[in-house]
Image (cartoon, rainbow, N blue to C red):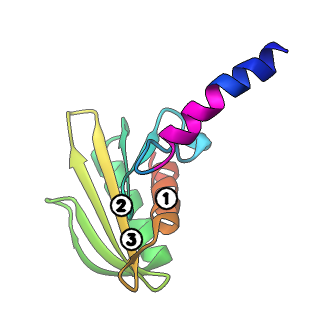
């Protein structure tokens, strides 16, 4: 009885909070790393893994999934083609131990959030 009551109290809140650009957890296997949709085509999250490890993982994943057009480790940007989509990967150092990962993907000028989410999970799993 308590579970049903709790469900009916929490369900409307979840429905309204999940509309729009609400937080979205990606990949339970990522441990403490969570992600959220920053816009319709962008997944973003913070990681406590080293920047160099995340950069190397992002380059490896981008090479495996498609062709890298441009990469710049100093500014933390990678632009690539993957699965007929244009992908931008951006790594931003927030503190010495925290790095923000932002991945955007667009296919034929339309958002491809599924690809961005998949790349985000692969990069965070690949980083050591």
Q: What's the residue at 42%, 67% (across, down)?
A: 60
Nearest the eye: 113 or 99: 113
Q: Position of residue 120 (x, y in %)?
A: 45, 56
Q: Earlier in the sequence, mark 3 or mark 1?
A: 3
Q: CA distance from mark 3 to mark 2?
A: 7 Å
Q: CA distance from mark 3 to mark 1?
A: 9 Å
Q: What's the residue at 37%, 39% (across, down)?
A: 47
Q: What's the residue at 54%, 35% (across, down)?
A: 31
Residue at which label 2 appears: 103
Residue at which label 3 appears: 105
Q: Answer whether residue 17 is magenta in the image.
A: yes
Whether 6 is drawn above or below 39: the answer is above
* SS state under label 2: strand
Looking at the image, do the residues carrying marks 3 and 2 touch, with CB atoms under 8 Å apart?
Answer: yes
Whether 23 is drawn above or below 73: the answer is above
Q: Position of residue 113 (x, y in %)?
A: 46, 64
Q: Residues within 10 Å of mark 2 (few under 14, many from 20)?
A: many
Q: Residues within 10 Å of mark 3 (few under 14, many from 20)?
A: many
Magenta range is 10-19
SS assignment for the magenta stretch, majority = helix
Q: Position of residue 114 (x, y in %)?
A: 52, 65
Nearest the eye: 1 or 49: 1
* SS state under label 1: helix
Q: Which mark is residue 67?
A: none
Residue at which label 1 appears: 117
Nearest the eye: 55 or 103: 103
* SS state under label 3: strand
Which quadrant would the N terminus be assigned to in this image? top right
Q: What's the residue at 72%, 26% (across, down)?
A: 7
């Amino acid at each position: 009885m308590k579970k049903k009551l709790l469900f009916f109290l929490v369900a409307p809140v979840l429905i309204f909070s999940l509309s729009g650009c609400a937080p979205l957890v990606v990949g339970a296997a990522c441990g403490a790393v969570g992600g959220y949709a920053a816009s319709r085509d962008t997944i973003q999250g913070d990681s406590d893994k080293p920047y160099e490890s995340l950069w190397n993982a992002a380059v490896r994943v981008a090479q495996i999934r498609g062709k890298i057009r441009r990469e710049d480790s100093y500014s933390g940007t990678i632009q690539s083609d993957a699965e007929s989509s244009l992908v931008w990967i951006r790594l931003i150092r927030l503190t010495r131990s925290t790095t923000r990962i932002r991945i955007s993907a667009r296919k034929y000028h339309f958002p491809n959030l599924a690809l961005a989410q998949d790349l985000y999970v692969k990069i965070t799993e690949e980083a050591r």
